[in-house]
Image (cartoon, helix red, strand yellow):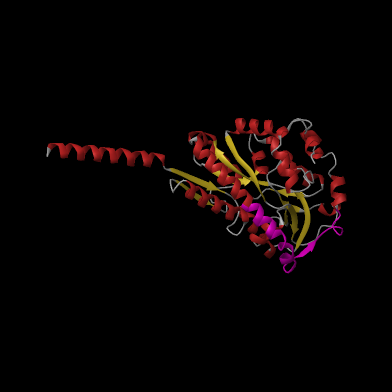
Amino acid sequence: MKKLFCITIVLILTLGLALAAAAQNKVSIRLGHIRDTNHPTHMAALKFKDMVSQKSGGRIDVKVFPNSQLGGPKEMFAQMQTGDLEMVYGGINTLAWIKGGEAYEITAIPFLFRDYAHMSKALLSDFFKPVQDKAEQDTGLKIVTINGDTAPRGLSTKDKPIYKADDFKGLKIRTAASPTVLTAMKTLGALPQQVSFSELYMALKTGIVDAQENGAIVVQSASLFEVQKYYMKTDYIRDIETFYSAMPFWKKLSKKDQEMIFDAAEKSGNYETELTQKQLTTVYDSLKTKMTVVVPPQLDLDSIRKKLEGAFDSFEGTKWPAGLIKKVSALK
């Protein structure tokens, strides 16, 4: 009887230790992004959630917070830096908005990247690796993957179309919080304004701003066509969705979990690219039923390029390493 009692106690203790170990191995990840629930970014984030849960046997739980529920990019980056948020899924452009990530301002130079493939190849190249390493060290954020086409940015306006560079003069436009974008708009004669993405629709509706410069998929998914009359297909700035992680959180993960999260992030980025490119085949036809869509050659892109020549010379060697633009431009 005594022997049976001892065996029972040992089994209870063993089970308790096993359950405690299992509980300790459970991981909870909060993942924030700024896009609405109709956007490919959100669909990719949900795919990431499902893949991580499946691959970890439910041990790692991802909670997705869309539509700026946790704040804009700067606010979410700050939360990761203080340990209050584990991951963010957002554009590589936005890393330049915080101290230590300034080199990524190069990704917001108008017309620098020919297409998504060119941008991806440049950012994942050997010559860009030191830029990424330094940004991770200086920001305390881990760049898990740079993968996911977000479609090129264009321009929409409320009252008048834009056909050439001179038409930007006096345009009250909401822009991203990027010194490069602000410089571009000021050089063109526009009046750039800072409005958070979550407040953009109302800002356009109430006339706080008259224009904005997101791409066609955002105009469609966020219903900006309800408060804008014209869409100009400039395709002037490109971006790549990026999975970011708080560095202390990332380092606490086992190597196996890091590899699993990386793999899920890569596949989710591929999924976003697939969704984005599929939507791009129909989005302009859809917008044409709701807005006037202006495309080249009616839209004089050469006049815009010419007006912007030399606008970013002061950033060379200060924001990003000298010679980096040439390397990107020369990449085939």
In the image, 163: left or right of 288?
A: right
Quadrant of the drawing holding the N terminus: top left
Q: Position of residue 230 (x, y in %)?
A: 76, 62
Q: Position of residue 207 (x, y in %)?
A: 69, 59
Q: Position of residue 248 (x, y in %)?
A: 51, 34
Between 39 and 277, the one lying in front of the other is 277
Q: How many marks?
A: 0
Q: Residue at x 87, y 45 (%)?
A: 306
In the image, 166: left or right of 61?
A: right
The residue at the far left in this view is: 1
Q: Quadrant of residue 199?
A: bottom right
Q: In this rendering, does residue 59 appear at all?
A: yes
Q: In this rendering, does residue 319 appear at all?
A: no
Between 248 and 58, the one lying in front of the other is 58
Quadrant of the drawing holding the C terminus: top right
Residue 49 lies in the magenta stretch: no
Picture layout, residue 328 above or below residue 149: above
Q: What residue range appears in magenta? A: 271-300
In the image, 135: left or right of 1?
A: right
Q: Residue at x 62, y 46 (%)?
A: 90
The residue at the far bottom in this view is: 289
Picture layout, residue 279 above or below residue 125: below
Q: Quadrant of residue 130?
A: top right
Q: Position of residue 161 (x, y in %)?
A: 80, 60
Residue 292 lies in the magenta stretch: yes
Between 77 and 26, the one lying in front of the other is 26
Between 130 and 194, the one lying in front of the other is 130
